[in-house]
Image (cartoon, grey):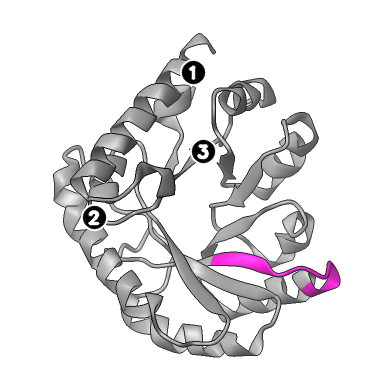
């Protein structure tokens, strides 16, 4: 665990450098530490080293770790089944992977039971990959308009997982397309959304993502090292 603090410092420096290139403040970029398979001890070391937000891919891992981790903002970043929403609705700050009205209905129902409004991001399958979840860009307008009927969810932005490529320059085009989509809806007047966050970029490509407009990046391996 001795490298976690060093790794976080190096990542934050890279975030600053990428922010300079895109002419924005690094203070506005949220670093989410992705803690899939990581122990509470590792997560706590990351939090003590400056991580304020963590992201989990699986509901069960949130439940297993929640009481052992220093208070922090939790994000659900993986695919979420409707029957598991009830277990995390009062534990997470934001759900990133929303891509169906069925899931929105369940989040709205469970959030209402807890008298809260859940922040969500709409997942976009920007590269039209069969292996990825998410809406097609052309489906977004209709999807957002359907959300007018739900008072316990608030759309805070968009999220995507770009294709993996050894050369991150090859996925820059997808990040650029996401920024264009984000900007289209950021200033629209569709009820119950306030587009603040563009969540894209991971260990291999977060610098390119920030250069193209990401203000939320999800990084695991560069913080904790390769998974076993």
In the image, 84 versus 107, the foreground residue is 107
For the residues labelled 2 and 3, say whether their Cβ atoms are less than 8 Å apart: no
Q: Residue at x 49, y 19 (%)?
A: 4
Q: Which residues are magenta?
A: 112-120
- The residue indicated by pointer 2 is 212
Question: Spatial distance from mark 1 to mark 2, Cα to Cα?
Answer: 27 Å
Image location of residue 176, percent across then percent down:
21, 61
Q: Is residue 114 magenta?
A: yes
Image location of residue 121, percent across then percent down:
51, 65
- The residue indicated by pointer 3 is 34
In the image, 52 versus 175, the foreground residue is 52
Tell whether 188 sits left or right of 228: left
Question: Spatial distance from mark 3 to mark 1, Cα to Cα?
Answer: 15 Å
Q: Residues within 10 Å of mark 2 (few under 14, many from 20)?
A: many
Image location of residue 18, percent across then percent down:
25, 41
Q: Is residue 47 magenta?
A: no
- The residue indicated by pointer 1 is 5
Count of marks overlaid on the render: 3
Between discs 1 and 2, the one toward the N terminus? 1
Q: Secondary structure at mark 1?
A: helix
Q: Residue at x 44, y 25 (%)?
A: 8
Tell whether 218 sits left or right of 208: right
Q: Quadrant of the N terminus?
A: top right
């Amino acid at each position: 665990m001795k490298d976690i603090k060093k790794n976080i410092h190096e990542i934050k420096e890279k975030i600053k450098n990428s922010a300079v290139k895109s002419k924005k403040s690094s203070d506005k970029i949220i670093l989410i530490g992705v803690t899939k398979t990581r122990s509470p001890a590792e997560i706590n070391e990351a939090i003590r080293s400056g991580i304020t937000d963590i992201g989990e891919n699986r509901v069960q891992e949130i439940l297993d770790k929640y009481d052992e981790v220093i208070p922090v903002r939790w994000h659900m970043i993986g695919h979420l089944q409707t029957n598991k929403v009830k277990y995390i609705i009062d534990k997470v700050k934001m759900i990133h992977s929303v891509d169906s009205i069925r899931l929105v209905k369940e989040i709205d129902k469970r959030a209402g039971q807890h008298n809260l409004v859940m922040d969500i991001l709409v997942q976009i399958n920007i590269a039209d990959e069969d292996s990825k979840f998410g809406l097609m860009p052309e489906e977004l307008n209709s999807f957002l308009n359907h959300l007018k009927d739900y008072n316990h969810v608030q759309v805070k932005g968009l999220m995507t997982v770009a294709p993996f490529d050894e050369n991150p320059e090859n996925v820059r085009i997808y990040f650029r397309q996401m920024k264009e989509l984000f900007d289209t809806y950021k200033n629209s007047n569709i009820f119950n959304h306030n587009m603040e966050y563009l969540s894209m970029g991971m260990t291999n490509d977060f610098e390119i993502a920030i250069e193209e407009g990401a203000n939320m990046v999800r990084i695991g391996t560069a913080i904790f090292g390769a998974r076993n």
